[in-house]
């Protein structure tokens, strides 16, 4: 969930190159139109221009699917993220300035937190033949 098209495209490109199927949304309205929340991980900006914050949207999704991991990416850690958001066992925070390798590591940690082994997570460069 990212309202900045450039950042959204970059995150989508990074996650896709890691072998993940990506559904991207730019605003609350797009999130609310999704038929279900069948995701392994949500990657969300904290501050969104559409009114609600990323944490607000993630809390709403987790009310239906509490097992979904979340990685918040933002330059804003304090204020919009509650203590509950920051201490949730399936939540991580990453500063907005990141590299592909650090995004991959954060996704791997969230994948493990969800109770899956790394055997199920294969970026294209390490996919077994």
Image (spheres, rainbow, N blue to C red):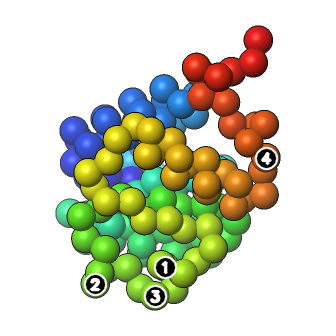
Mark 4 sits on what residue? 117
Res. 53 in view: yes
Sequence-earlier tag: 1 or 4: 1
Q: Would you name the residue on which mark 3 appears?
A: 83
Going from N to C along the chain, the mark reached first, 2 or 1, is 2
Q: Secondary structure at mark 3?
A: helix
Quote the CA–CA distance across marks 2 and 1: 11 Å
Q: Position of residue 90 (x, y in %)?
A: 62, 67
Looking at the image, is 24 positioned above or below residue 21?
below
Neighbor class of circle 4 (other Cα within 10 Å; few <14, some 14-19, many 20+) is few
Look at mark 2 in the image and give the residue it sits on: 79
How many other residues sit within 10 Å of disc 3, few (<14), some (14-19) or many (≥20)? few
Q: Quadrant of residue 67?
A: bottom right
Q: Rounded to the nearest whole Å, what is the CA distance between mark 4 and mark 2?
A: 34 Å
Closest to the observer: 2 or 37?
A: 2
Whether 54 is drawn above or below 56: the answer is above
Q: Secondary structure at mark 2?
A: loop
Label drawn at residue 85: 1
- Residue ranking furthest to the top: 129
- Which of pointers 3 and 4 indicates the residue nearer the eye? 4
Mark 4 in CB contact with mark 2 (< 8 angstroms): no
For label 1, count other residues whose C-alpha is less than 10 Å away and answer few (under 14), some (14-19) or many (20+).
some
Q: Position of residue 61 (x, y in %)?
A: 56, 67
Task: First in sequence, mark 3 or 4: give its number.
Answer: 3
């Amino acid at each position: 969930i990212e309202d900045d098209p450039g950042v959204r495209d970059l995150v989508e490109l990074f996650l896709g190159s890691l072998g993940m199927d990506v559904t991207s949304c730019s605003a609350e309205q797009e999130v609310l139109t999704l038929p279900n929340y069948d995701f392994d991980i949500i990657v969300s900006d904290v501050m969104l221009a559409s009114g609600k914050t990323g944490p607000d949207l993630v809390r709403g999704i987790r009310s239906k699917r509490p097992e979904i991991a979340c990685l918040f990416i933002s330059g804003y850690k304090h204020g919009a993220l509650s203590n509950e958001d920051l201490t949730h066992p399936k939540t991580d925070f990453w500063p907005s300035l990141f590299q592909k390798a650090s995004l991959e590591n954060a996704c791997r940690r969230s994948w493990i937190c969800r109770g899956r082994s790394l055997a199920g997570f294969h970026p294209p460069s390490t996919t077994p033949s």
